[in-house]
Image (cartoon, helix red, strand yellow):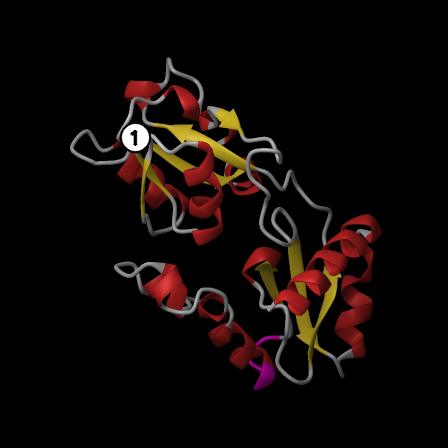
Amino acid sequence: MSTQGDKIQDVALSKIGEKALFTKELEVALEDGRVDLVVHSLKDLPTTLPAGMGICAMLEREDPRDAVVLNPRHANLGTLDRLPPGSVVGTSSVRRIAQLRRQFPHLTFADVRGNLNTRLRKLDDPQGTYDALILAVAGMRRMGWADRISQILPESTILHAVGQGALAVECRLEDTRIFQLVKPLVHQDTQLRCTAERAVMRELE
């Protein structure tokens, strides 16, 4: 299924309501019974869910940190701080831009949209404008692109998004059958940590 977040590719996420764009259509399908459960990247899931919906499982978390993926012409540089002044770094995340701009004022940040493969194609385009991308380590590994990671940014440089690296299963609260079905997928440590992160974020919102 495609969501609005998948379809709208020419507008920055920060300008069109970041979170629910990737979940609303899926939750409507869940609510009206077309599907029995939905799997999300937890970082894309709003901290407040629609009435009658709940997270019935959080799977074991991958590395939650952010990665630098360099344009092949800069592969020998290795790290973000070695990019020349004015280099263009692609990311659609306001969180990433806000933190990295303070750490790397010599860089320019620009929006980049699309799924992972699309973003990498944009980075590698010889006529493209991007010198590097900031992407989630977890996504790179899950999609088989770990070898493209040039640098993993430490949390002292950039704090990861709430729930980043974890997958969540959303279902109808009344559907006890699904709760039992996905129970073996629950990773307790991930669930405790991510629930705490989401609780803090909910208060800040």
Which amino acid type corresponds to the residue marked 1 in the rendered image? Asp
Q: Say left or right for 128 vs 120.
A: left
Q: Is residue 57 magenta?
A: no
Please say if 3 is above or below 27: above
Please say if 123 is above or below 44: above
Percent of width and height locating residue 124: 28, 31
Q: Residue furthest left?
A: 127
Which residue is nearer to you in this view: 153 or 26? 153
Please say if 190 is above or below 143: below
**Residue under the image location 70 percent in, 45 percent down:** 61
Percent of width and height locating residue 28: 52, 81
Q: Quadrant of the C terminus?
A: bottom right
Q: Say left or right for 20 vs 201.
A: left
Q: Which residues are magenta?
A: 31-35
- Number of numbered discs visible in the structure rendering: 1
Percent of width and height locating residue 17: 42, 69
Neighbour class for label 1 at 10 Å: few (<14), some, many (≥20)?
Answer: many
Q: Say left or right for 118 vs 197.
A: left
Q: Quadrant of residue 178?
A: bottom right
**Residue under the image location 41 percent in, 39 percent down:** 101
Q: Quadrant of the N terminus?
A: bottom left
Q: Quadrant of residue 170?
A: bottom right
Which residue is nearer to you in this view: 150 or 102? 102
Secondary structure mostly taken by the magenta-highlighted segment of the chain: loop
Q: Is residue 34 magenta?
A: yes
The residue under label 1 is 131
Q: Quadrant of residue 7?
A: bottom left
Percent of width and height locating residue 154: 60, 31
* SS state under label 1: loop
